Image (tube, rainbow, N blue to C red):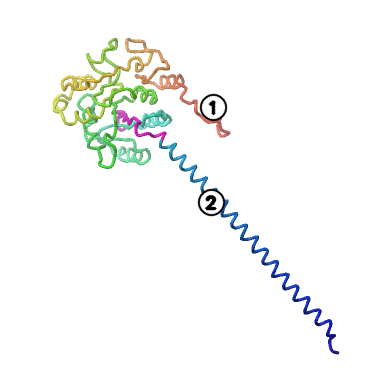
Amino acid sequence: MKPNGSNGRGFIISCFFFIVFLCILAFVNEIRFDSLMKFGKCALTHTSHNSSAENFLLANLTTANSSSDDIRILIGILTLPDQYQKRHFLRLIYGTQSPVGGRVDVKFVFCNLTKEDQTVLVALEIMRYDDIIIMNCQENMNKGKTYTYFSSLPEMLNTKDGPYPPYHYVMKGDDDAYFRLQSLVDSLRPLPREDLYYGYVIPCPSMDPFVHYMSGMGYLVSWDIVEWVRDSDIPKNHLEGPEDKIFGEWLRDGHRGKNRYNAKWSMYNYPEPPTRCTHELWPDTIAVHLLKTQEKWIRTLKYFNVTQNLKPSKLYHIP
């Protein structure tokens, strides 16, 4: 049989219109896809601009919070190599403080290591915390350790790439003293950054910082005095004796420390047992000294509510 001519033509026409329909459908979809891509690019560009603006804002906020006017303070806590537990405890105390308006670095300072276990354990501490200064000396209390501490710092810390001075102030502190870093920063802000001698005046009843010297619980000097200690012959020739008293005599003989600040009674000895050097714990505190037992440390830390910023969590329950 021969196929019907009209049916063949109809089939061809139907196929033609079907192909045209497919072409039109493909064209419309292409237009929609291009529009969608342009919209997506626009949205991504807008998001990118917002993100850049936020990053710029955050960068400026960070810069604002770490101004070049911030005070740089080094606190060197003189201790012994074997005092591992004490150092870990003090890291908790100072690592949870974030003073505003100042950078405060707390370092643990001692003389050469003398035992095999120290070479391992202290090295691990340095690798983990980077907060230890080991000086080239033999351990002593009143035979030049404080001199070695101050006189070694310029060579250790002065660099061509870093700021000068590396610290505006350097403090020598005891490991049985609790320093409130924000209070320390606030007290230093209005003070001179040159020829400054700061601390708790001895003897205890005295309020005149120009008569005697500052207590060894924690005294602070400006960086120019640190460099003077390194360069002058006066400290070199007078090393032995009570270290805080000797330091005051250096400044007296060298006519240094013309700017002096008596931080009494923001610095004081723990209130028990009561003496002429003690004071009750009170809010206007920079340092509390003679915290010889854990009980005294805990009472002091509770008074200043040092755990107030502890965040609630399902992982722990602390009454």
Magenta-tinted stretch: 64-81
Based on the displayed image, in which of its 4 quarters is residue 38 positioned?
Answer: bottom right
Identify the residue position indicated by label 1 in the image.
318
**Residue 121: x %, y % from top left:** 34, 38
The residue at the point 36 percent across, 24 percent down is 184
Residue type at numbered disc 1: Ile
12 inside magenta stretch: no
Element type at mark 1: loop
Residue 70 lies, in percent from the top left, at: 35, 31
Q: Which quadrant: the C terminus?
A: top right
Using the numbered discs, state the Cα–Cα distance from disc 1 to disc 2 in whole angstroms.
48 Å
For label 2, count other residues whose C-alpha is less than 10 Å away and answer few (under 14), some (14-19) or many (20+): few
Residue 16, image quadrant: bottom right
| Residue pictured at 83% horizontal, 85% vertical | 5
Nearest to the observer: residue 138 or residue 58: 58
Which residue is label 2 attached to?
Answer: 45
> In the rendered structure, are the residues bearing label 1 and label 2 in contact, judged by CB atoms less than 8 Å apart?
no
Q: Nearer the viewer, residue 284 or 1?
A: 1
Q: Nearer the viewer, mark 1 or mark 2?
A: 2
Q: Quadrant of the N terminus?
A: bottom right
Given the current orientation, which residue lies at the most extreme bottom position?
1
